[in-house]
Amino acid sequence: MLELRSVTKKYGRKTAVQDMTIECQTNEFVVIFGPAGAGKSTTLNLIAGITEPTVGGVYVNGHLMNGVPPEHRNMSMVFENYALYSHLSVFDNLAFPLRARRLSQTDIQHKVREIAEILQITQLLERRPGFLSGGQRQRVALGRALIRDADVYLLDEPISHLDAKLRHRMRGELKALCQRKQATVVHVTHDYREAMSLSQRIVVLNKGHVMQFGTPQEVYHTPANEFVASFVGEPPMSFLDAHFVAEPTPGHLVVTGTEAQPVHVILSESAAQILRERPLPKLLRIGVRATDVSIRTTPQDEHNSPAEVYVVETLGHRDIVTVKVGLHLVKVAAPSGMGLNVKDTVWLNLTPRTYHLFGDEAAIAHPVRDAHVPEGV
């Protein structure tokens, strides 16, 4: 088990990681997900012992690792800049960690061939890194890290330089390979699909702070704040500023900027109670995922919020329609072939089952699920 307890790392006046506390179970695949400059690579370096925390401790199986040299931590790391030995062939780069542990030549041959086949680099074994493409070097670096047994594997953007088709295949191979290792894996990425498809739990990081730590379903369906809601998902969540109208009870929301044709949004009973009983947030925002709402060309049933088509993006299996609700732009996933044109009037179903509610950037309420739908579906 890997733990970071109240870890802070400062470089002079700059804080790279602030009061980070996370716990990774044995055999768990944890992804650290966030934008550039969030502190992702710094976190891996702290775990590996390449740099020491300013405050707090790194623990493996209950033992404090602070001050323990990297070579004594039984961890294996893939660096973002590959860190290959340029004078050695691909075979020798892969074999290097095995020779350091004095494995037999037969075992080395077997393990190198096995990892090379998984990573599709068998034909490159005699080449040197200088004669490889960036994607090929990245696969060699990944293979060198995963070829040996370790307690913890640290992967810093290990497949980011691969082309889209190979990256898609490698996600599955990487997850299967790490499951066979039966070790803790900490994987850094800024790619949403990679984070969701690989992880058992995700650490969403921003400016050195942990925004949320949970399963992919938790961070997607119940984001803790606006940052998580906007960063997790494709296309990103859209936001509508709104204000609370207390009367008639239990109250409702009105989207700002819709004075000419007010858009009234119903509140769930729990959300209305929160807004009535607590100090009203300075900023209320409705968060809308493109796949949660739908479009109709005429008002019907719950589709009673008017909007104007702004742009239509055709993706083949569906369209992403951007509509204007007052002064706000909202992205909606729609069936392809609806025949929508710019400036058409359409109608959205903004109901407690389709939107999130945030107050001063913190989550207040999430879509209300039907009773017969299991949690997490």
Image: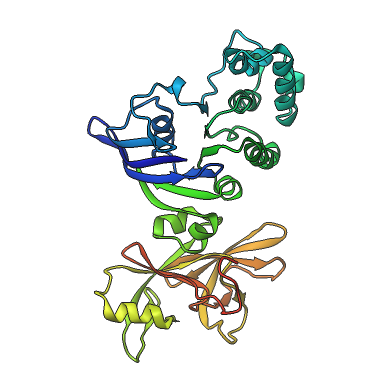
Q: Nearer the viewer, residue 81 or 111?
A: 111
Location of residue 346 in the rendering, given as x and y in whole percent from the top left corner: 57, 76
Colour pattern of the rendering: rainbow
Residue at image position (70%, 36%) is 166
* Extreme residue in the top direction: 87
Residue at image position (44%, 49%) is 204
Residue at image position (50%, 45%) is 25
Q: Nearer the viewer, residue 102 or 192?
A: 102
Location of residue 330 in the rendering, given as x and y in whole percent from the top left corner: 50, 66
Q: Is residue 201 visible?
A: yes
Q: Is residue 55 above or below residue 354?
A: above
* Extreme residue in the front direction: 62
Q: Is residue 87 above or below residue 137?
A: above
The quarter in which the C terminus is drawn is bottom right
Location of residue 279 in the rendering, given as x and y in whole percent from the top left corner: 24, 74
Instruction: Decide if residue 237 is on the left or right side of residue 317.
Output: left
Q: Is residue 34 visible?
A: no
Location of residue 227 in the rendering, given as x and y in whole percent from the top left corner: 40, 55
